[in-house]
Image: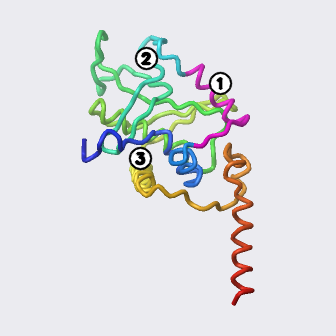
Amino acid sequence: MDGWETTDYLPLSGIQHYAFCPRQWALIHIEQQWEENIFTFRGQEMHQKANNPYVVEKRRDKIVVRAVPIVSHSLGLYGVADVVEFERSERGVTLARRKGFWRPVPVEYKVGRPKSRNIDTLQLCAQALCLEEMFDITLDRGYIFYGATRRRLDVLLDAELRSETKDVAACMHQAFAAGITPAANYNAQCERCSLIQLCIPKLSESKKVSAYLRTAIDS
């Protein structure tokens, strides 16, 4: 298992949290804090519809499987893929009770719109890396379905995205081992964070100013 103990594995969902904000990730995954808002509620509602593990659809040359448990022993990550579509392909793998060869393609569901940052594509890439390891196959793409636009984003799993995903996973493990929650750094994205009332980034910024003023006065 490449040196990872089972208890050292981290939730794959943390990839997006860490890429969005290391402090948010630490509050959730180190301090075990969470708070619901309208954005998390909508996300849960969408995932409840997507993540029914008892539904397997067959559409001509495609098999759609929901809520698929996935793991990467090399990255020390585990989680559940919203949807994995198995497309009939000569470059695929064999499946139990299915004829022919099938190529897995991860499909991640998001409630909002495509983002300017690549936090969603990093999470999708982590899912793809898990599937590659589990099925001993190389994948070239995946999809993200956005609820606000009702459209799929075709994501190319190129070398740059793969490298960044692995880097984020490594940073997560280092941060978890250290057990330290980073200080807040307030910016515009904080207003859409479900943990803003727990994080209180503006207060943290104020404390920094106060500390500076006290130091200036004392000196």
- Secondary structure beneath dot 2 equals strand
Amino acid type at circle 3 is: Asp
- Secondary structure beneath dot 3 equals loop
Residue at 25% from the left image edge and 47% from the top image edge: 3
Q: Sequence-wise, which precedes: disc 2 or disc 3?
A: 2
Above or below 62: residue 5: below
Q: Can residue 50 be seen in this view?
A: yes
Label 2 and label 3: CA atoms lie apart by 24 Å
Disc 2: which residue:
62
In the picture, residue 185 is in which quadrant?
A: bottom right
Q: Quadrant of the C terminus?
A: bottom right
Q: Give the range drawn in magenta.
A: 33-50
- Secondary structure beneath dot 1 equals helix
* Residue 45: image tag: 1
Can residue 133 be found in the magenta stretch? Answer: no
Q: Can residue 59 be seen in this view?
A: no
Above or below 216: residue 194: above
Above or below 31: residue 146: above
In the picture, residue 88 is in which quadrant?
A: top left
Residue at 50% from the left image edge and 39% from the top image edge: 13
Give x and y (percent) for residue 11.
45, 39
Residue at 68% from the left image edge and 29% from the top image edge: 42
